[in-house]
Image: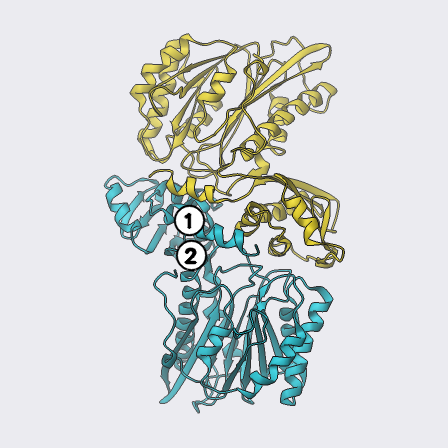
Chain colours: A yellow, B cyan
Amino acid sequence: MPVNLSTPRKGSLLPIAGIELGIASAGIKTIDHPDLVIIKLAEGTKTSAVYTQNSFCAAPVILAKQHQNKTAPAYLVINSGNANAGTGEQGLQSAQACCQAVAELAGVDSSSVLPFSTGVIGQQLPVAKIQQALPIAYQKLTSDNWFNAAHAIMTTDTVAKAVSKKIDIDGKQVTVTGMAKGSGMIRPDMATMLSYIATDAAVKQSVLDKILHTAMEQSFNRITVDGDTSTNDACVLMATGQANNDEITRFNSAAGQSLYQVIAQISQQLAHAIVRDGEGATKFIAIEVNQGVNAEECRQVAYTIAHSPLVKTALFASDPNWGRILAAVGRSGISNFDLSKVMIYLGDVCIVDGGQPAQDYTEKQGQKVMDQDEITIKVELGRGEAEDVVWTCDFSYDYVKINAEYRT
Amino acid sequence: MPVNLSTPRKGSLLPIAGIELGIASAGIKTIDHPDLVIIKLAEGTKTSAVYTQNSFCAAPVILAKQHQNKTAPAYLVINSGNANAGTGEQGLQSAQACCQAVAELAGVDSSSVLPFSTGVIGQQLPVAKIQQALPIAYQKLTSDNWFNAAHAIMTTDTVAKAVSKKIDIDGKQVTVTGMAKGSGMIRPDMATMLSYIATDAAVKQSVLDKILHTAMEQSFNRITVDGDTSTNDACVLMATGQANNDEITRFNSAAGQSLYQVIAQISQQLAHAIVRDGEGATKFIAIEVNQGVNAEECRQVAYTIAHSPLVKTALFASDPNWGRILAAVGRSGISNFDLSKVMIYLGDVCIVDGGQPAQDYTEKQGQKVMDQDEITIKVELGRGEAEDVVWTCDFSYDYVKINAEYRT
C-alpha cells in the first residue's frame, strides 16, 4: 500500500499542445498489459534530459545520449517489462532497431528518436514484439493520453504517477504535465526511475537545461529507497513553445522563475510519489538537515540516516529509537564535528539537545510522532547556515519479500 | 541460526599466563545472567587498543582513551546489557565510578582501569548494581575463565565467540586467546563489537600496536552486517610477556611475523564469527575485489556490493541475480572506470565477462553456487594489481524482525 498516494484522476492530466502519446501492448510483460509508449514532439520542441550516474548504464541510455548529441529529438520510444541492461552489444543493436522502427513509421532519421527501457535486467529485448506493436502505438498518437501512458510505463509500481499544473506567464496560460515510474528509487533489476515532463512554454534551450538540473536537485536527486542506483534512470523535460508566450531567455527572470517553480513542484510531487510507492513502504520520511557549513555535508548526514537499515527498521516498527538516529549522525563522516552543538528533532519533539538526550523528552512524546505515517526527522548541526533535505521510506518485511522473491 | 558456527569447546580456550578473568551477575540484563567481567593484567603487560570511529562515542570509550593515555592499564571492567552511550555527563561519571570501584578493590589508581560497556543505548548505567557485583567478580579472578567471560559479554549474540592458538617463537611456546561479541557489526543500540585478545608473548609496545592495527585491517575492519557503526566498538590486545621469549622488537622480524600471523588469524576468525552470527544471517559471504589501482578502490567496490540491500536480499533468496551485483559495481563511484575489462564471478562461475553477461553462463550454474551457505563473489576490475576483501552476510526477514522488534 503506497503511503497517502492514489492514482491520479484521468481528467486531472492536461494535454500539452505539441505533445502526442501513443500506447500499445507488445506482450513484453503480459499479452494484455500496455507496455509500449511513443511520445511525439512537435517541430521546434526543445528537450533536456538527465541520465543515470551508474557506470553500467543500459543500452538505451547509451544510445539516447548519442542521439541527443546529434540532433533535436522528435520521438521518444519507451518500453516497460525489460530494461535492456547488461545486454552488451546485442542490447545496443536492439535499442537501435526500436529507434529505426519508429523512424520508418514517422519518416524521420533514427537519431531523432530517443529510446528508454525499464524492467528486468540482463535479458535481451524482444525486438520483434516491439516492432510489431509500434505501428499500433504510432496510429494511436493523441495529446490526451497521459493517463494511459503513465500506466504503460509502470513495472512494480502499485499506482500510476502523474500530475498537471497550469500557470500564467506574461498573460499567457502555460501548462505542465509530468509522469514518472519507479518503486524503489534504485532498483537495478526493475531499472527504475523514468520521468517525462512536458510544457507548452516557449523557453530557450539553456534555460530549459538549467530548469531541469535545478529541479532535479530538489526532487529526484533527493530521494532514496534503498541506496541502490539504477542502470536506466532518466528524466526528460520537453518544451513545445506552443503557449505563445515570449520566449523565456533567462532563468532568473520572473517568467523563468515561474516556469522553474511549477516544474520543480511537479518534479518534487512525482519524486515523492516514487518514495510513497517505495517497495514495502509504510511511512514517508523527510530528513531535514540544517545549520551545516555547506549543503553537501547536510546531504551527507541526511543520506547516512536515510540509508541506515537500523533507522529504517525502527521507523517501520514505529519505535522512537533515537539512539539509532544519533549513531547515524555520528558516523556520517563530517570533519571537525562538535557534537555538543547538535540538536535532533522527531517531528516537533526535541530528542537530542546539545549532543545529549533532551532532558524533557519522554518516550510518550516520541511514540506519538512515530505512530504517524508521515514523519520529519530534523537535525541541526550548529556549524553554519546551509541546509538540505532527503526523502525516504521505511524498511519493512515487504521490502525483503519483494526483493527476495522478485524473480522466483 | 548462525552460519556454520558453534560455541567453542570450554577446554579449547587456553589460559594466558598473567591474565585473570572474573565474572559476576550484576542484574543489568536479568538477575541470573552473567553480565560483568573484570580482566586483571599482570604487571608489565603491554596493552594496545583501537576504538570506534563514530563521533558519538560512548562514555566508556571516552574514558578508556583518557586512561590509556595516562598510564599502563592494570584492569579492564566490562559490562553487557547497557552501552552507557548517549548518556551525557552522567554517563561519564558512571563509567568513572565503575573504574573507581575496581581501583578500590585492587588498590590501584582508577586511571589504570579501562571501562567497556555494551547493550542498550541511551539509558543510564545502573552503577549501584555494578558496584555491588564487582567484589564478587574480583574474588573470582582466575586465569581459566575465558569461556565464561566470552558468554558474559554477549548481548544478542546467539553463540559465544572465542578461540585459542599456540605457536613456537624462538623455541618458546607462545599462546594467544581471544574473545569477541557482536551480532550485527554495527548496531548502535546493542553497541556492539567488543574484542579482547591476550598473549603471553614478550613484545615491544610499538610492535604490539603495529600488530593490532595490521590485524584489524584484515579482520574487524573488513566485516559489515548493515553498514551502521557502533558508538562502543573496541578491540584490546594485551601481551603479558610471561612466555619468556626474547622480547620481539621488530614487526618484520621472523618472531614478529609469527606473532602477527597468529593474532591476525584469531582476529579474522572472531570477525568472521560476528558475521556468521549476524542478525538474521543465513549465509556467509566473502567479497573479493582485485586488479584495482589501489586497495582503497577495491574496498569501495566491495563495500558497495556488501551494503546493497538488493544484493543482500538476492543472497537471502539464493537468487543468482547477477544484475544486482553488476549494478552495484557500476555505482561504486570509481573514476575513469573502463567496464569492458570487468569480470565478475559467483564462486567459480564467471557471470560477467568484459563488462557483458558471460556467454557460457547458465542460470543453473549460478543457482548451484547460490544454494550454498558460504558464497564468494569475486570482481576483477582490470585496472591494476591491488586487492581487498570484505565479509558480510545476507539480509533476511529476521534482520527486519530483530531490529524492528528489539525494544518492543
Name the residue furthest front.
Answer: B31
Residue A166 is labelled as: none
User: Callout 2 environment at 10 Å: few (<14), some (14 to 19), or many (20+)?
Assistant: many
Q: Label 2 to label 1, Cα distance in Å?
A: 9 Å
Q: Which chain contains the residue that carries disc 1?
A: B
Instruction: Give the camera-side residue of B236 and B83.
Output: B83
Residue A107 visible? The answer is no
Q: Which residue is mark 2?
A: B392
Q: Does residue A189 appear left or right of residue A340 in this picture?
A: left
Residue placed at 42% from the left, 62% from the top?
B277
Q: Which chain contains the residue that carries disc 2?
A: B
Instruction: Give residue B252's position: percent from left, percent from top.
Output: 43, 77
Residue A233, above or below B285: above
Residue A39 visible? The answer is yes
Name the residue furthest bottom.
Answer: B244
Q: Secondary structure at mark 2?
A: strand
Residue A61, above or below B95: above
Which kind of residue does numbered mark 1 sit on?
Lys
Same-chain status of marks 2 and 1 = yes
Q: Does residue B18 appear left or right of residue A209 in this picture?
A: left
Q: Does residue A361 appear left or right of residue A154 in this picture?
A: right
Which kind of residue does numbered mark 2 sit on?
Thr
Q: Which residue is mark 1?
A: B312
Instruction: Give residue B386's position: percent from left, percent from top.
Output: 40, 57
Quadrant of image for the C terminus of chain B: bottom right
